[in-house]
Amino acid sequence: MSLDVQNNLFLNNIDDILQTNISKTAHTVLIVDDEVNNLQLLKRTLHGKYNILTATNGKEALEVLENNIDRISLIVSDHKMPVMEGTEFLEKANKISPDIIKILLTGFSDIEILMDAVNKCNLFQYMLKPFDPQELQQVIENGLDKFDLASSKSSILTDLRELFYKTIKSISSALDAKDPYTHGHSLRVTLYSLILAKELNLDDKMLEEIELAGLLHDIGKIAIPQSILCKPGKLTDEEFAIMKSHPENSEKLISSIKKLAGISNWLKSHHEKWDGTGYPGHLKGEDIPLSARIIALADTYDAMTSTRSYRKALEHQVAMDEIKRCSGTQFDPKLAEIFIGLSDTIKAAKENPEEFYKKYSYLQKEINSTIV
């Protein structure tokens, strides 16, 4: 599939991707008060507009909150209650779900106590008792407007992150499609890189950047003529010089994109060798960025175990033996040793890359975890 066709198919779905996930059903409000009359007044005030949950003390309210964490949008709580005061309950509620709007009803007008409660509980507003039901209803509506706005922003950010990730994968797949022999190459290189990176216990930011770098490591090949990329025989010196320009092309393409600028040097360095004989900068040893050393191992393994126009794929163990042989010259010896130690996992991932990618993809897990 051509790059234009893939992009058109992808762009046709942008409207779907950017649909927010805000529920159109009525909001659920939790009312907490130990006095039955007050509880009934609050229920009558809000009846018909919202789904109502009730509790008669802070401890009971925490149980209701934990059992309905995905439903509750707003809490109205009395201050002075037995078992647990409203401020203590709201402070605990804020730790459980800081996005829920919190309103405190109190008979005390001590400004220091109230400001302390505002700060500790992340209060949206406090109201002095006795309260005007219409005024309370307006405060609740304002609070729910804020809740909807925050939910909308969160949803849009999630959708934009998903759009960004899908765009990267689309570009990666389109690049691989330039050469029928490299179908799935970028995804497999990314997968093997993530397997190694997780074994190294790298932090989440590094995992995200390695995933992006793996998917885009060959983006510079977009400027390489098809006749060179798909040539069945040995490249001439002139053709090889053109092919060797793709890491620098990758850096130029990516460095101007703010979100990706940090990985541009990694893309430029993934053909450097531990002994300094690689290209384009002849970097040596730990002067080569760690991520580039990781991707170099994954890239070489996939190249060896994939059928190309000029040769058949090598067996998994043959490729592992070659990596061991080139440890300390082409590859970082410590990373090569760990990669070889992951032989069984790498082999299983090679045989079922799509399923393993779901397990190891950091970006996909991040998107999934933020979708309600």
Image (cartoon, rainbow, N blue to C red):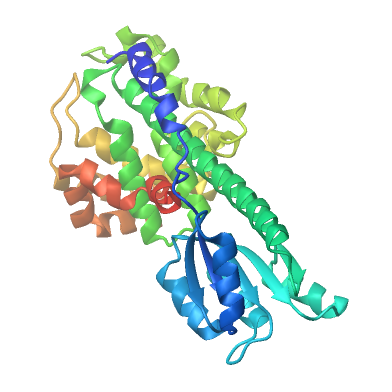
**Image position of 271 (left or right of 89):** left
Residue 226, position as x, y percentages in the image: 33, 9
**Image position of 312 (left or right of 195):** left
Q: Residue at x 46, y 42 (%)?
A: 292
Q: Residue at x 51, y 31 (%)?
A: 268
Residue 225, position as x, y percentages in the image: 37, 9
Who is closer to the viewer here, 294 or 140?
140
Who is closer to the viewer here, 182 or 51?
51
Residue 172, position as x, y percentages in the image: 37, 28
Q: Residue at x 60, y 34 (%)?
A: 261
Dividing the image into 4 quarters, which one contains the N terminus?
top left
Who is closer to the viewer here, 150 or 328?
150
Q: Is residue 342 visible?
A: yes
Residue at the extreme right of the image, as rendered: 111
Who is closer to the viewer here, 70 or 359?
70
Q: Residue at x 45, y 44 (%)?
A: 24
Would you place residue 166 above or below residue 130 in this image?
above
Would you place residue 190 above or below residue 236 in this image?
below
**Image position of 18 (left or right of 35):** left
**Image position of 135 (left or right of 285):** right
Residue 188, position as x, y percentages in the image: 28, 39
Count of numbered badges drawn on the protein? 0
Q: Is residue 273 visible?
A: no
